Amino acid sequence: MKNQIILWLSSFVIVFLIGYVKNVTDKDYPVTGTFGIEGRKVSYKLDKISFDKKAYTNIIISDISGIEAKLLLKHNDKINEFIFEKIKGGLECSIPNYKPGVTVYYKIIISYKDQIFEIPKNDFVRLTFWGNIPFPAKLLYSILLYAGLLLAIRSLLEIFNNNQNLKKILIIGCSIFIILNIIINPLYNTYKLGAINHFVPSFSQLFDPLLLSILIIWIAGTTFIFNRIFVKTITVAIAALTVVLFFFI
């Protein structure tokens, strides 16, 4: 029992670290930063994707009196300017939503007295709009995806337990990826594309080839292991390929 607890705790820690690394290295990770003006902090975050229902809102956190800012939005070679409004604890600016899949580029310019701060300097940040995804769909998607990753790591660590529970772990893992691929991911993508009551998405739009690849790997690997073919090698391969593909999802 103690050995099982150690293996599960180790799996959770490894998955947490993998998830953290994926988030901070992801191409959609927002541009964030903090700088000082007269000894006081100004913090900002420029998102690269938006799932907002009505409008994308950008917030600058600062309690400096007299600070001003504007947002420059570039789309189809046209640049529009939006002015930040004062709110409690900072500034706020909203821009209207575009259709799902549309990408625009923007930057913020902060001014205080005779100082100008251009973020990012001499460049723009990409912002892609997607349809609003209900919280239950997002939650189920994340839970199943990370549960599958957890089982991949746990199956690898089961080597230290003489593979006593390996088959059980693999069956549960296959079930999770089947549900994720057949039910949850298509639902998630339907909302993401804004297809509800508008159009029927194609097969390629509904299903993620990377998630399907993980499912195929798990089914094929489980078949080999149940037939006792290269058990350790296949177990390592399932875990390694799942982690690698996870970083591209």
Image: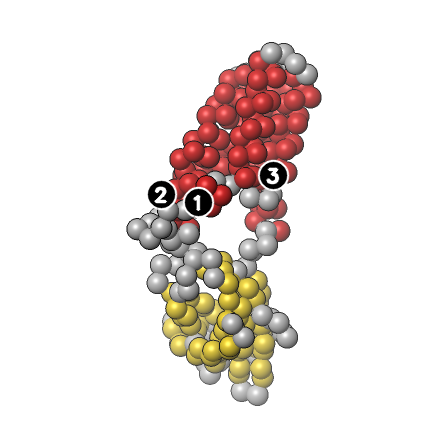
In this rendering, the answer to whether 95 lies above or below 160 is below
Question: Which of the two discs, 1 and 3, sits closer to the camera?
Answer: 1
Report whether residue 142 is seen: no
State the scheme by which the image is colored: secondary structure
Sequence-wise, which precedes: disc 1 or disc 3? Answer: 1
Q: Outermost residue, top direction?
A: 227
Q: Position of residue 49 (x, y in %)?
A: 49, 58
Picture quadrant where residue 138 is located? top left
Q: Which residue is mark 3?
A: 245
Q: Callout 2: helix, strand or loop?
A: helix
* Residue drawn at (64%, 75%) of the image: 122
Q: Callout 1: helix, strand or loop?
A: loop
Q: How many marks?
A: 3
Q: Amino acid at mark 3?
A: Leu
Q: Which residue is mark 1?
A: 202
Crowdedness of circle 2 by 10 Å Cα count: few (<14), some, many (20+)? few
Q: Position of residue 139 (x, y in %)?
A: 40, 42
Contact, CB < 8 Å: mark 1 with mark 3?
no
Front residue of 40/217: it is: 217
